[in-house]
Image (cartoon, grey):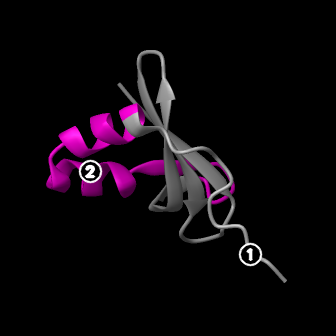
Amino acid sequence: MVKKVNEGAVSFSANKKWLAIPAAIRKELERNVWCSNCSDVVQIVNYVVKDSPPGIVLEGTCQNCGKGVARFIE
């Protein structure tokens, strides 16, 4: 059985924007994502960084329940 790790294409420009944010702030953003399944703020895991016209989007899964979550960053 083959496990798919990253199904999306890597966006180098989005990754560059993400890495331009200081590490401490990136950690805070990772820990401040809304999960509609848990109805709470959770940590995003196994995420990919994607470009969005006004900023970037982190798309991944909730650390608590495993459902899909996303975080938009301007």
Frontmost residue, 72 versus 6: 6
SS for callout 1: loop
Mark toward the viewer: 2 or 1? 1
Which residue in the structure is indicated by mark 1? Answer: 3
Which residue in the structure is indicated by mark 2? Answer: 26
Q: Quote the CA–CA distance across marks 2 and 1.
A: 27 Å
Task: Give the left or right position of residue 18, taking residue 72 as reference.
Answer: left
Within 10 angstroms of label 1, few (less than 14), some, or many (20 or more) residues? few
SS for callout 2: helix
Q: Is residue 35 magenta?
A: yes
- Mark 2 belongs to which amino acid? Arg
**Percent x, y of residue 10:** 52, 45
Residue at the farthest right position:
1
> From which residue to which does the magenta span run?
13-39
Q: Is residue 12 magenta?
A: no
Mark count: 2
**Percent x, y of residue 5:** 64, 67
Q: Name the quadrant containing residue 4.
A: bottom right
Residue at the location (84% across, 83% down)? 1
Q: Is residue 74 above or below residue 26?
A: above
Residue at the location (27% across, 57% down)? 27
